[in-house]
């Protein structure tokens, strides 16, 4: 098991450079195989979810050359075969291969995808899109066999603006016949990044970033060169850390427009922030006040920052509330935060945080990626020593976490026990 050992309460200063967005890269990689030609991706984050996607590509006989932060993906010798369960169950985004293999070969067999256990996470919306485009879906024991004689564009309304179903819908529609219109699409910046890359490859997609996206199918796609957008969730996590322990902590290589909902809330709380278009400088102080948040799809407050943000609310003066509207199981960090000194109660999908509390080190356990991030922030703020078990979750989404934190003054060590 991987564990993180942290001596807390160190002042943190200097610069953190944010890497490429996990939730963009995990869609761009499966989308790149729609072409038979090479695609070069740069600013790819160095995280374990990407290692799994590379293993899947190699399993499918796709050649992958990597240098620091870049991947050259060559699908010219690709073979369509069922991805083994022990690869596809390691991350949710493995199901983006359902769309790209279906689009390219008109047939795919795949297991139900994995991902953090933060809710039930069904894939009905993706299957609805595939069926609307003419695919036949058969399911037995969580293995999906999906095929189509022809994929034909149509108009689809998603029941909710699902990121995954929007990504899958866009990927599959790029090679379908005619026009596909996705209504109630997700509006996340990662969707725009995917469409930007696909358009460079020769796709015809308009409306990305809006609730209605139009895709006019094309015969084939070419390779391209694309730089992954910065990770707004990694950035937000370090900005919150700055408000907890920063002494002129600078977070750079970001797009602050993508973080507006977080930065607005932090300003309301009285956090000391200097916001530029591609960087934020943040200082901690003791007089921040509590606030209320409700998670929502972009441009609302991101569910992926809810857990890290709760750690900031623990020390804020007064009462705060947090309503989690996307996932039903994203409060698994709370018992551990309470063990460390927080006063947080849970009622259904809402947390009440009685603030103004200080934290002390404890032995705690990451239960998923962002719960792990929340505990890591708490450990860096706390007095004394914290051990975080199951740290592998954190490595799924935060690149070079110990190196980045050590460079700004944290005392942290990753161990294997
Ligand atoms: N939903 C359905 N049916 C579907 C799809 C979704 O009911 O077919 C529900 C889900 O159960 C959930 C909500 O709709 O309650 C939103 O799910 P969505 O499909 O938008 O999420 P996702 O695509 O599975 C991505 C990110 C998540 C992030 C969410 C929301 C990736 C690989 N994952 O998940 O990222 O929380 O969008 O923004 O892009 C993370 O990075 O820690 C993470 C979990």
Image: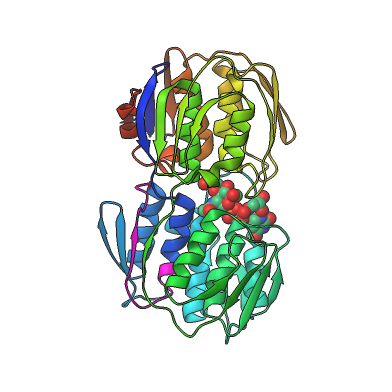
Question: Can residue 158 be found in the magenta stretch?
Answer: no
Nearer the observer, 59 or 195: 195
- Which image quarter is the N terminus in? top left
From the viewer's perspective, is residue 171 above or below residue 71? below
Q: Main secondary structure of the magenta part?
A: loop
From the viewer's perspective, is residue 241 above or below residue 160? above
From the viewer's perspective, is residue 133 above or below residue 358? below
Residue 83 in view in this figure? no
Which percent across, then down, holds residue 19?
A: 38, 45
Q: In this picture, which residue range is highlighted in magenta?
A: 31-47
* Residue at 38% from the left image edge and 30% from the top image edge: 3
Residue 297 in view in this figure? yes
How are the colours assigned in the image?
rainbow
Which percent across, then down, holds residue 256?
A: 50, 43
Which percent across, then down, holds residue 83?
A: 43, 65
Nearer the observer, 120 or 205: 205
Which percent across, then down, holds residue 107?
A: 51, 78
* Residue at 47% from the left image edge and 73% from the top image edge: 101
* Residue at 62% from the left image edge and 38% from the top image edge: 330
Question: Can residue 46 be found in the magenta stretch?
Answer: yes
Residue 315 as seen in the image, left or right of residue 229: right
Residue 219 as seen in the image, left or right of residue 157: left
The number of discs equals 0
Nearer the observer, 131 or 358: 358
Residue 248 as seen in the image, left or right of residue 73: right
Residue 318: image quadrant is: top right
Residue 65: image quadrant is: bottom left
- Which image quarter is the C terminus in? top left
From the viewer's perspective, is residue 192 above or below residue 404? below
* Residue at 47% from the left image edge and 43% from the top image edge: 277
């Amino acid at each position: 098991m991987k564990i993180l050992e942290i001596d807390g309460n160190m002042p943190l200063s200097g610069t953190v450079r944010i890497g490429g967005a996990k939730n963009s890269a995990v869609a761009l990689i499966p989308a790149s195989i729609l072409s038979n030609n090479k695609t070069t991706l740069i600013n790819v984050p160095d995280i374990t979810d990407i290692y799994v996607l590379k293993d899947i590509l190699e399993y499918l006989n796709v050649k992958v050359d990597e240098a620091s932060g870049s991947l050259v993906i060559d699908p010219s010798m690709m073979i369509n075969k069922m991805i083994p369960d022990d690869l596809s169950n390691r991350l949710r985004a493995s199901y983006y291969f359902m769309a790209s293999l279906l689009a390219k070969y008109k047939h795919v067999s795949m297991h139900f995808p994995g991902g953090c256990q933060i809710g039930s996470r069904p894939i009905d919306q993706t299957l609805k899109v595939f069926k609307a485009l003419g695919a036949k879906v058969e399911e037995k024991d969580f293995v999906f066999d999906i095929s189509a004689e022809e994929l034909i564009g149509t108009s689809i309304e998603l029941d909710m603006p699902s990121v995954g179903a929007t990504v899958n819908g866009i990927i599959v529609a790029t090679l379908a016949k005619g026009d596909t219109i996705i209504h109630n699409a997700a509006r996340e910046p990662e969707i725009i990044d995917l469409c930007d890359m696909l358009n460079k490859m020769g796709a015809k997609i308009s409306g990305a970033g809006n609730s209605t996206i139009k895709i006019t199918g094309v015969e084939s796609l070419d390779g391209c060169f694309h730089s992954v957008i910065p990770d707004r969730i990694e950035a937000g996590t370090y900005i919150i850390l700055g408000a907890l322990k920063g002494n002129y902590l600078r977070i750079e290589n970001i797009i602050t427009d993508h973080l507006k909902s977080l930065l607005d809330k932090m300003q309301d709380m009285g956090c000391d922030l200097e916001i530029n278009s591609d960087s934020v400088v943040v200082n901690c102080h003791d007089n921040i006040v509590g606030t209320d948040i409700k998670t929502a799809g972009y441009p609302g407050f991101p569910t992926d920052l809810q857990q890290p943000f709760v750690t900031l609310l623990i020390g804020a003066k007064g009462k705060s509330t947090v309503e989690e509207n996307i996932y039903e199981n994203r409060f698994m960090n709370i018992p551990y935060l309470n063990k460390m000194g927080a006063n947080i109660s849970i009622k259904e999908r809402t947390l009440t945080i009685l603030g103004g509390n200080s934290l002390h080190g404890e032995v705690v356990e990451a239960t998923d990626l962002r719960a792990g991030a929340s505990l890591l922030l708490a450990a860096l703020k706390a007095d004394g020593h914290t051990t975080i078990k199951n740290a592998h979750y954190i490595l799924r989404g935060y690149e070079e976490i110990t190196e980045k934190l050590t460079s700004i003054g944290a005392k942290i060590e990753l161990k294997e026990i």
